[in-house]
Amino acid sequence: MTIRVLIKRKVVPGNELALADLLTRLRTLALQAKGYISGETLHSLDDVNESLVISTWESLEDWRAWEAHPGRRDLQAKIDRLLAFPSEHRIMVYGV
């Protein structure tokens, strides 16, 4: 079953460039992950520091494997240090 993962982030002002670099590195790594289909980043019109990443995966198992990947975990820890609060993840599916 295809899933989508929504990741909400709010960067601390001044950390935008560092965050952009880490997100590029994260997406580059994700492109090699089993089951990764696509990803997009949206930015809030109401709050320039808030973004939402929507990534699509072939299965929950593929996402869980990616979530546990040591390279992803390392980059995610670095990303979270640049944020006002830790990244929020939600896993969603089409109609049940």
Image (tube, helix red, strand yellow):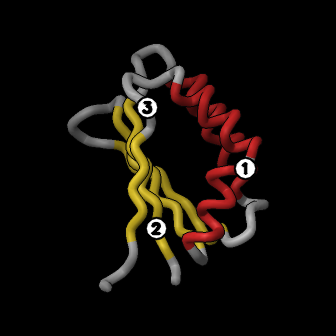
The label shown at residue 86 is: 3
Residue holding disc 2:
4
Q: Quadrant of residue 12?
A: top left
Report the side of 84 relative to 72 (left or right). left
Q: Of circles 2 and 1, which is in front?
A: 1
Q: Quadrant of residue 13?
A: top left
Residue holding disc 1:
69
Q: Quadrant of residue 86?
A: top left
Chain-order first, disc 1 or disc 3: 1
The residue located at (31%, 84%) in the rendering is 95
Circle 3 Cα neighbour tier, 10 Å, few/some/many (<14 / 14–19 / ≥20): some
From the viewer's perspective, is residue 26 above or below residue 35? above
The residue located at (57%, 24%) in the rendering is 17
The residue located at (59%, 66%) in the rendering is 38
Local secondary structure at mark 1: loop
The amino acid on which the numbered mark 1 sits, given as a three-letter code, is His
* 3D distance between C-alphas at marks 2 and 1: 18 Å
- Between 65 and 76, the residue placed more toward the observer is 65
